Image: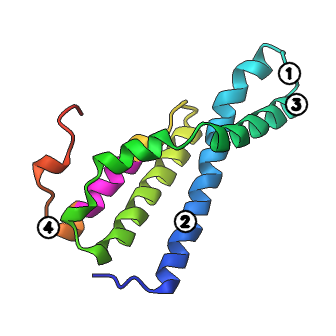
Amino acid sequence: MVPSSPIFIGAIIGVALIFDFTNGFHDSANSISTIVSTKVLSPKRAVVFAAFFNLIAAFGFGVAVASTISKIIKLDIVATESIPVIVLGALLGAISWNLITWYFGLPTSPPMPSLAGSWEQGSRQQGSLPSSSIPSSW
């Protein structure tokens, strides 16, 4: 079991910022490609446009995806000290997915690998996850 020291939590926050960066360049490329390829906006204006509306969306439209994921993942079945490791696994899975799909030019988003990383780390920390923790609709 990895202790949840302030240094470890700080490292997880650093990894979260790296994820945010990789997710930003991955999603912004997807969102501005049509605008630039159809010559509606120049690349520079398209990036400013995407950045502005991503900021507006973050504060104006809530946290529906995060809320849904928090209802799917059942953290009450794992030890509290395991949760930072599970979060780290989710972040590393999502970063890997962002980099791999970016390299191959695939337009994707990281919520699914984040969940897969969470389940994998949860399984590793717990020994195995009960089947009831995985949504039956997936």
Upstream in the sequence, badge 3 or badge 2?
2
As measured in the structure, the alpha-carbon distance from the residue carrying label 2 to the one carrying label 4 is 25 Å
**Residue beneath the point at 80% across and 35% down:** 47
- Kindly identify which residue carries mark 2: 15
Q: Is residue 88 magenta?
A: no
Q: Are marks 2 and 1 in contact (CB under 8 Å)?
A: no
Q: Position of residue 33 (x, y in %)?
A: 71, 25
**Residue beneath the point at 39% across and 71% down:** 84
Q: Is residue 43 left or right of residue 117?
A: right
For disc 1, the neighbor class at 10 Å (few under 14, some 14 to 19, many from 20) is: some
For disc 2, the neighbor class at 10 Å (few under 14, some 14 to 19, many from 20) is: some
Upstream in the sequence, badge 2 or badge 4?
2
- Kindly identify which residue carries mark 3: 45
**Residue beneath the point at 67% across and 29% down:** 31
Q: Are marks 2 and 4 in contact (CB under 8 Å)?
A: no
Q: Nearer the viewer, residue 67 or 120?
A: 67
Residue type at numbered disc 2 = Val
**Magenta stretch: dominant secondary structure:** helix
Q: Nearer the viewer, residue 131 or 70?
A: 70
Q: Are marks 4 and 1 in contact (CB under 8 Å)?
A: no
- Kindly identify which residue carries mark 4: 127
Which element carries disc 3, helix, strand or loop?
helix
Residue type at numbered disc 3 = Arg
Which element carries disc 2, helix, strand or loop?
helix
As measured in the structure, the alpha-carbon distance from the residue carrying label 4 to the one carrying label 3 is 50 Å
Residue type at numbered disc 4 = Gly
Q: Check the image and name the residue furthest to the top.
A: 38
Q: Which residues are magenta?
A: 114-122
- Kindly identify which residue carries mark 1: 41
Residue 52: quadrant of the picture: top right
Quarter of the figure that contains the N terminus: bottom left
